[in-house]
Image: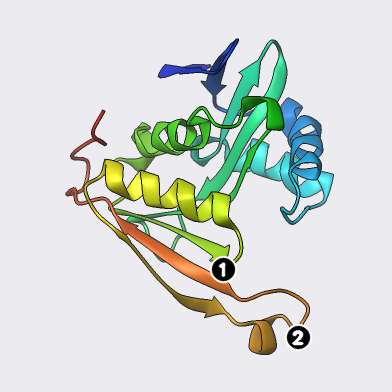
Amino acid sequence: MVDTLERARTTKKTAVLRTPTKDDGSAVWELVAECKPLDENSMYMNLVQCDHFSETCVIAEMDGDVVGWISGHIPPSEPETLFVWQVAVSEKARGQGLGTKMLRAIVERDVSKDVKQVKTTITRDNDPSWSLFRRFARRFGTELVDEPHFIKSEHFNGQHDTEHMVTIDLGRGAGQGQAAA
């Protein structure tokens, strides 16, 4: 199924945004592996995301190739929050605002009608993610706030940089409002 507003212009081609299916799991896994320095999950994990969490994930395709992916979910303990787990955009589709368009597509789906905030975690050195989420916050006329959440020494046994919890208040009541165009 192709989302209605979802044709994102790229330099030469149009990316079509859609809800993933279980058939997309291996292509997502390959895309994430190409998008260093993203943490890679098992192919099985990506398959489960595409199958069980499809309504809060999005695929961007160009000429039949998966060039963009966002995985997310609405935590049962926080039904007004969309937690974004991972954003991946292929080299050939970068610089066109595809990440913002994919994120917006999820927030505008029926499954997100009660979502009032978007959360994600980002390491301090992940400039593309900081840029994406700052742009997204501006679309809603707000700023993001962040604080250390998963601490390198406490949670990662020194093996992974600290992840900062980023929160974006969408400034809308349940089921109301859209991002500025």
Specify the label residue 124 is tagged with.
Answer: 1
Mark 2 crowdedness (10 Å alpha carbons): few <14, some 14-19, many ≥20? few
- Amino acid bearing label 2: Asn
User: Viewed as shown, does residue 34 lie left or right of 123?
Assistant: right
- Look at 75% across and 26% down and name the residue there: 23
Place of residue 165 in the rendered image (x, y in percent of width and height, measured from the top left) = 47, 69
Place of residue 100 in the rendered image (x, y in percent of width and height, measured from the top left) = 44, 37
Specify the label residue 157 is tagged with.
Answer: 2
Q: Nearer the viewer, mark 2 or mark 1?
A: 1
Mark 1 crowdedness (10 Å alpha carbons): few <14, some 14-19, many ≥20? few
Which quadrant of the view contains residue 167?
Answer: bottom left
Place of residue 67 in the rendered image (x, y in percent of width and height, measured from the top left) = 67, 27
Place of residue 168 in the rendered image (x, y in percent of width and height, measured from the top left) = 33, 57
- Look at 56% across and 16% down and name the residue there: 11
How many labels were placed on the picture? 2
- Look at 56% across and 55% down and name the residue there: 127
- Is the residue 98 above or below the residue 169 in the image? above
Which quadrant of the view contains residue 54?
Answer: top right
- Quick one: which residue is furthest to the bottom in this view? 154
- Amino acid bearing label 1: Arg
Dot 1: element: loop
- Is the residue 40 above or below the residue 55 in the image? below
Assign the C terminus to one quadrant of the image.
Answer: top left
Residue 56: tell me if it is visible: yes
